[in-house]
Image: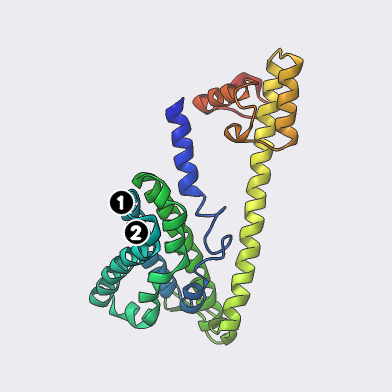
Amino acid sequence: MASKEDKNGLDTIFLRGILRENPVFVLLLGLCPFLATTTSFFNGLGIGLATTFVLVSTNIVISLMRNFIPDKVRIPAYIIIIAGFVSVVELLIKAFVPALDTSLGIFIPLITVNCIVLGRAEAFASHNTPFKSFLDALGMGIGFTIACVLMGLIREALGAGQIFGIDIPWLSENRFLIFIMPTGGFLVYAMLIVLATHLTKYLDKKKKEHEQAIIDAYLAQQNLDPKSRELIAECSDELHFSCESCSSSGSCGLEEYRHQLKDQRSFKPGIEGEH
């Protein structure tokens, strides 16, 4: 059971950076390169992948060295490590994708002081194992890349009338130039934040409904004493749908029942025969 709980924890570490703790839409970090460079899909993908490479590499190295870096000089040490990987990325882009180097310009070396990279190093990599740090960085990097690609696609389509360099009928002749300007960037960014917020709320609602179905099915099947029923009622009322975060975890039997359902992987609320 411990290994299954560890696996669930690793999944959470990786997935949270993609939506629930997306560095751009939720944490509001790295906005300078995000808004300045995402005028096209090509630029958005480029800055996203470059940042992801630096983020993953930096997290792994800092996690490996976390017990050797003195606390008083940890921030300068992190900056030096980050700068080293940024130099690698910059040289690779100059050598193999010179057009991207021209488009991104100063924003490639500025990855060194990107709040996402330094923030994950300080908040996560310096306190966790290399593998967990790798998953955290990969999830955050993918979340950042997705945000940059979406931003670039929308601004390129509306502002330049193109997608991937291909003209879009009507839009190519009726371009909304404001969208490739800073003002348009802020407008698109606001719309994307709204969409991300609504998507997160929708997923939370579906998760709540599913977890409530688990609790209802458990109560219907078990002959529980009043104390256990009271604990589960509190679990439902207070929305403690993660047993690990509940102070009464293990006292009511719900956690064991939840693991049984995950093992069967056939739970459908309201269908007794498949429990």
Mark 1 vs mark 2: in front: 1
Left or right of 254 in this view: 123: left
Judged from the image, the secondary structure of the residue bearing numbered disc 2 is helix
Q: Residue at x 65, y 27 (%)?
A: 248
- Farthest residue in the front direction? 72
Left or right of 228 in this view: 127: left
Return the residue nearer the eye: 67 or 178: 67
- Farthest residue in the left direction? 95
Q: Residue at x 60, y 31 (%)?
A: 243
Judged from the image, the secondary structure of the residue bearing numbered disc 1 is loop
Q: CA distance from mark 1 to mark 2?
A: 15 Å
Is residue 108 visible to the viewer in this orientation of the structure? no
Percent x, y of residue 173: 55, 87
Query: Badge 1 is on which residue?
Result: 68
Left or right of 89 in this view: 106: right
Return the residue nearer the eye: 83 or 208: 83
Return the residue nearer the eye: 155 or 32: 32
Q: Residue at x 64, y 40 (%)?
A: 207
Amino acid residing under circle 1: Phe
Residue 51 lies in quadrant: bottom left
The numbered mark at residue 58 is: 2
Left or right of 147 in this view: 47: left
Amino acid residing under circle 2: Thr
Marks 1 and 2 in Cβ contact (< 8 Å)? no
Return the residue nearer the eye: 164 or 76: 76
Residue 105 lies in quadrant: bottom left
